[in-house]
Amino acid sequence: MSGAARNTGFSIAGLALAVFLIGPFAWMVLTAVKTPDEVFRDPPTWWPHTPSARNFAAVLDGDFASSLLNSALVCAGTALVCTLLALLAGYPLSRTRLRGRPQVLGAALVSQLVPQAVLLLPIYGLARDLGLLNTRHGLVLAMLAVNLPVAVWLLRGFLAGAPIEVEEAAQLDGLTQARAYWRVTVPLARNGVLSVAVYVFFMSWQDFIFSMIFLTGPEQQTAPLWLLGFIGQHSVDWGLLMAASTVMMVPVILLFSVVQRSFAGNLTGGATKG
């Protein structure tokens, strides 16, 4: 096969993959701007004849904005606490000859093989005993149990990749070992720290199972739970559901656009260094 034919084949395959990945999101946005009659038209129309923003207006005019705020608070809190705890755990795992370190890191990886449903009962019992059910704090606790092991694994790799000589030089200048870690090593690994925080935010933003179990009151509902309200027993309001889903994607797209240059590379580096 000639080089030109091979390049053409790769281009076609890349275009097909792009359509496969982007197609569902494009269809979601197009459905969100269709009228109710056009949503159920048979055969379906690919492009709306009379685009309308009424679905977005109806979604944003209701309590969906409050659910977005709840999601933002839960996800930001989870990302912040998880990253801080992972940094604390990352110090002995990357800067000391901790006995049993391989076993600890192995346990962090094995924990990702455990289905989340297995964790529901013990975490639910703990949250109930602490009086944290139907609170954002309780949901943050549940999210930590899921995301902390992988955050520790990734951050340990980033911290291990930072030159220890710089930290030792800071200690010679009078800093304690702990201060040198926080003032020198952590800033050197700031891109990795940011990537892990964004990863935890993404994973928490799309959670549905834990939110459904831990949040029972409508005033505490997160955005994924609120989407369930558009699905009735006998019908689905597809226009509102697609509009709400599109709005829910906006914060993720904006956040990823800020960090996308280093996000994938940093996560790969964190998983392989050290």
Image (spheres, rainbow, N blue to C red):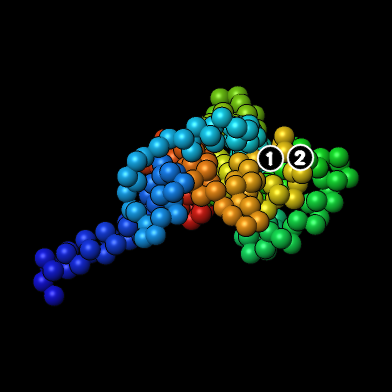
Q: Which amino acid does label 2 sit on?
A: Gly
Q: In which quarter of the image is the N terminus?
A: bottom left
* Number of residues whose C-alpha sits closer than 10 Å to that of mark 2, classed few (under 14), some (14–19) or many (20 or more): few
**Where is residue 234 drawn, in percent x and y?**
62, 57
Q: Do the residues labelled 2 and 1 touch (CB within 8 Å)?
A: yes
The residue positioned 48% from the left and 49% from the top of the image is: 267
* Number of residues whose C-alpha sits closer than 10 Å to that of mark 1, classed few (under 14), some (14–19) or many (20 or more): many
Left or right: residue 143 versus residue 170 is right
- Helix, strand or loop at label 2? It is loop
Q: Nearer the viewer, residue 105 or 29?
A: 29
**Where is residue 192 drawn, in percent x and y?**
49, 42
Q: In this view, does 143 lie above or below 41?
A: above
The residue positioned 17% from the left and 68% from the top of the image is: 6
Q: What residue type is labelled 1?
A: Gln
Left or right: residue 232 versus residue 122 is left
The mark found on residue 221 in the picture is: 1
Work out whether residue 149 can be spotted: no
Q: Which of 197 and 169 is in front in this view?
A: 197
Count of numbered badges drawn on the protein: 2
Give the image quarter of residue 261: top left
Left or right: residue 186 versus residue 46 is right
Give the image quarter of residue 115: bottom right
**Where is residue 177 drawn, in percent x and y?**
64, 33
Q: Which of 51 and 154 is in front in this view?
A: 51
- Helix, strand or loop at label 1? It is loop
**Where is residue 167 drawn, in percent x and y?**
54, 35
Work out whether residue 244 can be spotted: yes
Q: Mark 2 points at which residue?
A: 217
